[in-house]
Amino acid sequence: MSKKRILVIDDEEGLRMVLADLFQELGYDLETAKDGKKGLDLALSGDFDLVMLDLSLPSMDGLEVLCSLKEEKPDIAVVMMTGFASMGSAIKAMRLGAYDYITKPFDLSEVQLIAERALERRRLIDENKYLKNQLKANHGFDNVIGKNPKIQHAYVLAAQVAESNASVLILGETGTGKEYLARAIHFQSPRVNGPFIKVNCSALPETLLESELFGHEKGAFTNAVSRRIGRFEAADGGTLFLDEIGDISLPVQMKLLRVLQEKEFERVGSSETIKVDVRIIAATNRNLKQAIAEKEFREDLYFRLNVITINLPPICERPEDVPELANHFVRKYCKETGKGIEEIAPEAMQMLLSYNWPGNIRELENCIERAVIFCHGRRILPQHILLGGDSTPQVKMETPRELKPLAQVEKEHIGFVLGECEWNQTHAASILGIDRKTLRNKIREYELGTKIAEVEPDHEKTIH
């Protein structure tokens, strides 16, 4: 890890030397400047984590330096150094974005404490920015998997609507990736720095869903022991994803319609009106037009939600995408488990292609995750593929079961494990629960591969 870099801007040479000794002793890289103009030039051209800035400087005072610096590098941590007489200016500096100020003369332990706090805050800001960039990259439209024209059209439409504030209605069967698409729209939108809040509308009864969405005041109902902020308030400035919106009751639909129209609501048990700026992305696997005809869904709410509709096709309509999706999940779970699986065997892939996937992408992902867990070789084989809700591997047994000598069973099993491990003896011995010397003796005893048995340990293939 590289050292933190600190810049001290002060016209007093003695103070610059004292701070230089302190920060260098603490392990920081340090530069100094004796006037505001030179200090600003250094700060703008260098990559500093913290600037210790005096308020009273020749050529350009500290507030001017702070304003110019914050305009170009808003995330940089700045601690002002001031005399008692300029306390008003120090407070003004805080309003302009300084992290803190310290009055002269100061104790070096106090300087160290404030500097470390400022550097920690800068680290958290950088970490938060990195995580947001990672989320944006991971939920980009460039990451869409699939050549099917329907799925390509859905993501092109999503990319076009992401820049707007329009409500979006995502339609598709369970497991088709509606939440992933909603997140992609949010993270590629101008609201990326705001929250993304999800509510599963089918998971809560009417009374709890109303409280979940709009919040409640203390005593609004039994067990309301304190005020609760609802999801609309939590999503202010960001996106609210209402999953399975077709399952909400008519009374809650009416309140939701008001929020969409007026951008305001009241918490349960309160008369205070709260205004919010929230983008709505809704999703459902229901036929809402049919629900409207059956008086189960409000037509006016449907039209409010249905500014843009995106349809996600089920896997049975995009079978050409199964191999790419499956291999994507293999890579994902190999990265998580550290396994070195290189491919899905053709017979196993044929099983995936022949299945209709009623659970869609979610079911396919679960299937591949289990396959990676059960696979100890380089290839996912048919026996690793579990379909239709199975949770344990299917072991084919001979009927009637052949009675074999123990030595023959041991020979066949060792041979099978070696084959699965591509004859890597270290890996095979680990799976068999024996040391490599014992395995080599077994290979010779059962004549499983004379040449393999004679290979020196240093020449064995390594597992990556």
Image: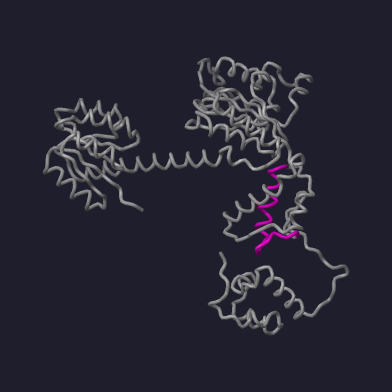
State the image coordinates of residue 239 (x, y, percent, origin top left): 55, 28
Relative to 364, residue 273 above or below: above
State the image coordinates of residue 284 (x, y, percent, origin top left): 69, 30
Q: Is residue 209 left or right of residue 30?
A: right
Residue 120 figure quarter: top left
Relative to 463, residue 54 above or below: above
Task: Please state the extent of the stretch shown in magenta in the rendering.
Answer: 360-382
309 in the magenta segment: no
Is residue 228 visible in the rendered structure shown here?
A: no
Q: Quadrant of the C terminus?
A: bottom right
Q: Main secondary structure of the magenta part?
A: helix
State the image coordinates of residue 150 (x, y, percent, origin top left): 71, 35
State the image coordinates of residue 228 (x, y, percent, origin top left): 52, 28
The residue positioned 79% from the left and 48% from the top of the image is 355
The residue positioned 69% from the left and 59% from the top of the image is 380
Which residue occupies the extreme right position in the image?
400
The residue positioned 64% from the left and 53% from the top of the image is 330
Residue 38 figure quarter: top left
Observer-nearest of 226 and 455? 455
